[in-house]
Image (spheres, rainbow, N blue to C red):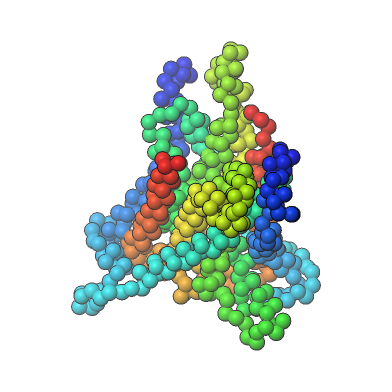
């Protein structure tokens, strides 16, 4: 049998790659297809799906509310949640970039072994429990939390500031959760920069800011684009952070989807919303892939 | 290397006294604040888990009592046991699958290779909440009873890319001449795999296995949707406790969770960066 395998490298490859590809195919691609199918089915009042009952009701529901007399009225609630998620993810990405870029630059300028230690320090939070890291912010932000406690103690404020359960808290939590995704790609692209270029810029009488803008920033662009995508995409689908740090007024797509499966028991609508989310994420990834391909062709 | 850089930087330095091209004012301070932001919440969580005061965030004394209470909590232990069973099973399954896959992908290029790469990284791209509800729908459609088995299946799927990437990286670093040398010394393919490739690959496999273990242990969203009544994991249990309110006991359990993650990440980092040149 081994002899047969050796003579057929294609068969050998199939046996090696086949199992993992089949597992992901069967337990991920098929469920995603099923999800799209469910989004086109009718709902059961007590949860679950009314199989074989084809309807586009779930997609109508995204924008409209059905009145008692079966007329449709525009209902912006769900659209608002999508727009809010989009806006929150975008502002989180900007904040992460403003923090992440200088830190990545700082890391690039360090010598070994200090540099490896810094990479390790940036990486560790990513691998620690997301739930626990967000919970730590509850301890900081709540009314009796550390920040309010300190401000009250210093006499800066009389009443605790409402920090927790606000969009601000969600943005902080999201930036905190996904910061490593921003720092590491930017670091990877900055690390490759030839510092003689920087010296050349200084020799040509460029100031620090001009040098950063004209030399470092263009060279770091692939890392910035990759990092921004890697932060934006998981933010868009976030569930834990808005569930712990956000209130009902800062619900994001992830919580909306989850809610359709738990409290609301409207699985087809939940499936349709999840499909929208997936489409947005795939679109963002596709745009980034096209962009980097164009860049590779140009450069 | 450092001397060479200094020599090259010399003309620039002469231009303005004390001007250093590799220095940016304020950058070190900014980075210090950044790392503070990254670690302060974690430090405070751990510190508060030792706080004797029950309700407020005010420090009233040191105690390890909350850890004692947490470790005597039957529900917590049950959840931790489930987490461990699931993480070990998902780790073994995904690492075996990922090792085979990485070996297959490291051979000659073939048609559809980009497609397979995309398929293997799919669990990293699809948002967790989407994977969670799609998997739930799938299990329900198949008529499977939600329990430990369904959670293990779901975890194995999303652990594959995490186990795959370090193994693949290690294979990529490997000198193809090694395989040729083994062949020159009359080792057949199987022997060359066992005696040459596998020992060199082992750090990559261990590193991948540890990442898969942590990712499974830490997962909340997918578990939340695919776990049945008796298969609650530690993160799902912590989530239900947080929903009920902040207590020092939650802090203690969370701190223990952090300790486990950090231990395994450090081990994985040491294994992956311990580059004996191959």
Quadrant in the rendering for residue A77: bottom left
Q: Report the side of B142 relative to B77 (left or right).
A: left
Q: Position of residue B80 (x, y in %)?
A: 62, 55
Residue at 54%, 64% in the rendered image: A95
Residue farthest to the right, as pictured? B61
Name the side, left or right, on which A124 lies relative to A82: right
Q: Quadrant of the C terminus of chain A?
A: top left
Q: How many circles with numbers are drawn on the protein?
A: 0
Depth check, front residue: A72 or A214: A214
The vertical placement of A23 against B65, above or below, is above
Picture coordinates of residue B206 (x, y %)?
62, 38
Q: Nearer the viewer, residue A42 or A220?
A: A220
In the rendered view, would you say A229 is above or below B192?
below
State the residue at coordinates (67%, 35%): B275
Residue A241 visible at all: no
Identify which residue, B80 or B102, lies in the foreground.
Answer: B102
Q: Residue at x 61, y 23 (%)?
A: B196
Residue at the outermost bottom position: A158
Q: Is residue A105 visible?
A: yes
Q: Is residue B162 left or right of residue B115?
A: right
- Picture residue at 39% right of the left edge, 47% below the top: A290
């Amino acid at each position: 049998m081994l002899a047969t395998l050796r003579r057929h490298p294609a068969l050998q490859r199939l046996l090696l790659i086949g199992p993992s590809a089949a597992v992901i195919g069967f337990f991920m691609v098929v469920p995603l297809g099923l999800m799209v199918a469910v989004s086109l089915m009718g709902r059961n009042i007590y949860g679950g799906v009314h199989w074989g009952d084809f309807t586009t009701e779930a997609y109508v529901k995204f924008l409209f509310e059905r009145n008692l007399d079966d007329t449709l009225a525009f209902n912006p609630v769900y659209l608002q949640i999508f727009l809010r998620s989009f806006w929150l993810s975008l502002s989180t990405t900007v904040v992460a970039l403003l923090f992440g870029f200088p830190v990545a630059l700082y890391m690039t300028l360090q010598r070994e072994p200090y540099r490896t230690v810094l990479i390790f320090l940036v990486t560790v939070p990513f691998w620690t429990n997301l739930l626990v890291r967000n919970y730590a912010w509850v301890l900081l932000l709540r009314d009796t939390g550390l920040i309010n406690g300190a401000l009250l103690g210093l006499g800066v404020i009389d009443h605790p500031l409402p920090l927790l359960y606000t969009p601000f808290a969600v943005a902080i939590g999201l930036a905190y959760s996904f910061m490593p995704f921003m720092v590491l790609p930017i670091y990877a692209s900055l690390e490759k920069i030839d510092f003689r270029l920087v010296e050349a810029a200084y020799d040509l009488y460029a100031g620090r800011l001009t040098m950063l803008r004209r030399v470092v920033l263009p060279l770091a662009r692939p890392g910035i684009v990759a990092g921004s995508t890697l932060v934006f995409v998981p933010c868009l689908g976030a569930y834990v952070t808005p569930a712990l740090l956000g209130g009902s007024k800062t619900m994001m797509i992830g919580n909306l989807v989850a809610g359709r499966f738990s409290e609301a028991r409207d699985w087809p609508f939940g499936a349709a919303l999840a499909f929208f989310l997936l489409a947005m994420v795939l679109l963002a990834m596709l745009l980034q892939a096209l962009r980097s391909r164009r860049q590779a062709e140009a450069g | 290397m450092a001397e060479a850089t200094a020599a090259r930087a010399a003309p620039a330095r002469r231009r303005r006294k004390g001007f250093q091209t590799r220095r940016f004012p304020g950058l070190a301070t900014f980075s210090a604040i950044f790392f503070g932001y990254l670690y302060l919440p974690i430090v405070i969580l751990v510190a508060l888990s030792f706080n004797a005061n029950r309700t407020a965030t005010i420090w009233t004394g040191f105690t390890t009592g909350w850890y004692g209470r947490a470790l005597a909590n039957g529900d917590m232990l049950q959840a931790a046991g489930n987490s461990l069973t699931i993480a070990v099973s998902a780790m073994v399954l995904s690492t075996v699958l990922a090792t085979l896959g990485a070996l297959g992908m490291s051979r000659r290029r073939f048609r559809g290779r980009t497609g397979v790469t995309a398929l293997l990284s799919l669990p990293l791209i699809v948002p967790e909440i989407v994977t969670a509800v799609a998997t739930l729908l799938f299990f329900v459609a198949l008529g499977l009873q939600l329990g430990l088995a369904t959670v293990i299946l779901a975890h194995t799927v999303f652990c594959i890319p995490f186990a795959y990437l370090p193994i693949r990286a290690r294979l990529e670093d490997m000198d193809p001449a090694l395989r040729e040398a083994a062949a020159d010394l009359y080792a057949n393919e199987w022997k060359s795999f066992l005696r040459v490739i596998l020992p060199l690959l082992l750090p990559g496999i261990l590193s991948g296995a540890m990442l898969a273990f942590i990712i499974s242990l830490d997962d909340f969203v997918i578990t939340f949707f695919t776990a049945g009544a008796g298969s609650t994991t530690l993160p799902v249990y912590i989530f239900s406790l947080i929903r009920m309110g902040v207590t020092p006991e939650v802090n203690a359990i969370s701190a223990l969770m952090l300790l486990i993650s950090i231990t395994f990440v450090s081990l994985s980092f040491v294994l992956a960066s311990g580059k004996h040149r191959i």
